[in-house]
Image (cartoon, rainbow, N blue to C red):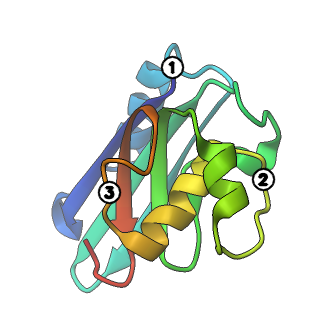
Amino acid sequence: MCGIAGFFGYKKKGPTNEQINKCLDLMKKRGPDYQNYVTHNFENKVSVMLHSRLSIIDKKKISNQPMEDGNGILSFNGEIYNYLEIKKNSNFDKFKTNSDTEVLLKYLSKNRNIPKNDLDGMWSYAYFDKRKKA
């Protein structure tokens, strides 16, 4: 299983680089294959999303997380069992990866909320919507 963590709040109370790296070190057992974080600053606030990856689906580097597009940032843990079906039947832009993470990122960018019957699987995720700044 992967590990996810994050912070959303005022810049002046945000985590330091040392705190972020310490958190990633603690998460390494959850995802030994890759650790990273993305910071998004806006107004006087900051969003920091951390991810520790255990590569199972699409082990290529391009599928590392947090995954970002023009609309949002996603840190995802779990598996979407029907992601290939959603990918095949979607009208999303061209996919760059073979990961269920990118399917979820495009889904959230378009729909923001997940209708209960659309996705089959088990997961937890954090998504930052750049447009709504939330």
Please state which of the two labelled residues, at mark 2 or mark 3, is closer to the viewer: 3
Residue position for label 2: 97
Residue position for label 1: 1
Where residue 45 appears, as percent x and y from the top left, is: 23, 74
Residue 64 visible in the displayed image: no
Q: CA distance from mark 2 to mark 1?
A: 19 Å
Q: Is residue 119 left or right of residue 48?
A: right
Q: CA distance from mark 3 to mark 1?
A: 24 Å
Where residue 100 appears, as percent x and y from the top left, is: 62, 44
The answer to whether mark 3 and mark 1 are in CB contact below 8 A is no
Relative vertical location of residue 24 with respect to residue 111 in this rendering, above or below? above
If you read the primary sequence from the N terminus, does the residue marked by circle 2 or circle 3 appear first? 2
Q: Amino acid at mark 1?
A: Met
Label 3 secondary element: loop
Residue position for label 3: 115
Q: CA distance from mark 2 to mark 3?
A: 23 Å
Other residues around mark 3 within 10 Å, as few (<14) / some (14–19) / many (≥20): few
